[in-house]
Amino acid sequence: MDIFSVLSLLGGLALFLYGMNVMGAGLEKISGGKLESILQKMTNNPLKGVLLGAGVTAIIQSSSATTVIVVGFVNSGIMKLSQAIGIIMGANIGTTVTAWILSLSQIEGESFFLNLLKPDSFSPILALIGVALIMFSKDGRKKDIGGIFAGFAVLMFGMSAMSDAVKPLADVPEFANILLMFSNPVLGILAGAVLTAIIQSSSASVGILQALTITNGITYGSAIPIILGQNIGTCATALISCIGARKNAKRAALVHLYFNIIGSIVFLTVFYGANAIFKFSFIDQSIDAANVAVIHTAFNVFSTVILLPFNKGLEKLAKLTIREKDSEQTGPVLEERFLNTPAFAIEQCKNETVKMAVLARDTLIDAISVIGAYDVKKAVMIEENEKMIDLYEDKLGTYLVKVSSRSMTEEDSREASKLLHSIGDFERIGDHAVNILRVAKEMRDKNVHFSDQASTEICVMTNAVTEILNLTVEAFEANDLSLAAKIEPLEQVIDGLKAEIKMRHVARLKDGTCTIELGFILSDLITNYERVSDHCSNIAVCLIQIKNSALDTHGYLDEIRSADNVEFNNYFKEYKEKYLLPS
């Protein structure tokens, strides 16, 4: 084997890893957002978790990616540690699909059908289709599909290049002697673990092993420990990703490690114990790519069947390893590791923005409640909540800018735009809550109160503002455009209430039933109310316009306020009657 063969081997490995990366990225982009909700909902028992983990990993072609995603869910509190264990086990099974696909390259036979099954036969076609979709399609989803096809083709070309490069090693006795060393289980496991930890993919390291089988120098006795080590080495990705994470996320990564270590020990004990009794004749025979896939699958299924009943034990073991309790989490939890999977990152931002929206609404309602009944403890809580809302805006804004710089589907891009526009309005609602709190404090400090008539009018406007807040949060959380359509008519009614309450106050000033000092306080209060409704309107318009792939706020508002807009006029009439000021 000369220097050019070594270069061919390294070039093949580079193509193989790059193809796997491109294919995996495309698969994650297409399936990411949907998988997030499935992963959260379908983990109510360990068996479902195993099936789900296997399915997701078979789709995105990476157990490391699935495990890192799960670690992120556990870290952000979306998923419990107990829910994660089944998915982690299933991920190990799902990753074996790649080995089966790669094993097709060594199919032998003269028939047209058998040759058609070989990746060498169909990967050029996939490459052609993939490149055509990437270059000529304007649809983002079709470009992602093109990336998957092209990535798979590059992967298979890399596999073929590696196989061709190592073929001459079949006639090199020194190479055969080196491989014999790995029949020692400890050395074999170490070799597989180190290789996989370096290249960060068990699928890739198994593919390399399959390419080496063409030399006929790898025996079953050498391959089995290496395959077990490869499963242990793939845990490195999750372990690295949990650095700086919360305790439960670290425990999830440790569960992955413990699962593979314990599974390897039990598998080797059973296998070599049986070999001592039955003397397996195949152990010194050469292994082929298909049987590498068989052993890879058999080990992971065996480990899952053996350890699934003891999932609680794995959880306890991880908790014993990391004993400290989590410190209280403050502010949004935004996983940096999800930036490589924008669909997950966007969904995570949506969840955190909903929390921000609920906090802003509740804080404003709390502020309203202290008008005329000032409470110091509640006032402190309102101010703390407002600081938390500011923190949400800062962290979400920074994170969304990072996500927006990544390659995303058109749908994810629209969602990111919607969130970026909305968080500013939710933050301003929190600011108005503090402004209203200051109004309440001023009334307490000056010992002044609104007249009965003014209090009744303010109560009507308060109810309207409370409804528009609830409508906005509900519409935003559910992305419900029918609810969003009700917000602008109600905002117009609130604008009218502000104007009418001001006019009534002027009339009371003339009658001497109200003071100028209370007039300033009243004006501050209802102005904050009206501006809260403006921000609710901004959010609603954003929901509707982003859904329609546009963001012309003024044009949209002019259109819906037109005299011939039946829906708007009906809602406006309904709310005007509902929030009619008493005579």
Image: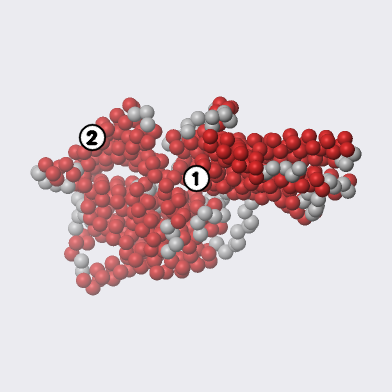
Q: Is residue 106 left or right of residue 449?
A: left
Residue that appears at 15% across and 42% down: 115
- Disc with the residue nearer the chain's start (2 vs 1): 2
Residue that appears at 55% across and 62% down: 322
Label 1 Cα crowd, 10 Å radius (few <14 / some 14-19 / many 20+): many
Give the Cα distance between marks 2 and 1.
Answer: 36 Å
Residue that appears at 68% across and 38% down: 494
- Is 182 or 247 nearer to us in this picture? 247
From the image, state whether disc 2 or disc 1 is nearer to you: 1
Element at badge 1?
A: helix
Question: 338 above or below 413?
Answer: below
Residue labelled with disc 2: 124
Residue labelled with disc 1: 347
Q: Position of residue 63 (x, y in %)?
A: 38, 51
Classify the position of the C terminus by image quarter.
Answer: top right
Q: Is residue 382 left or right of residue 13?
A: right
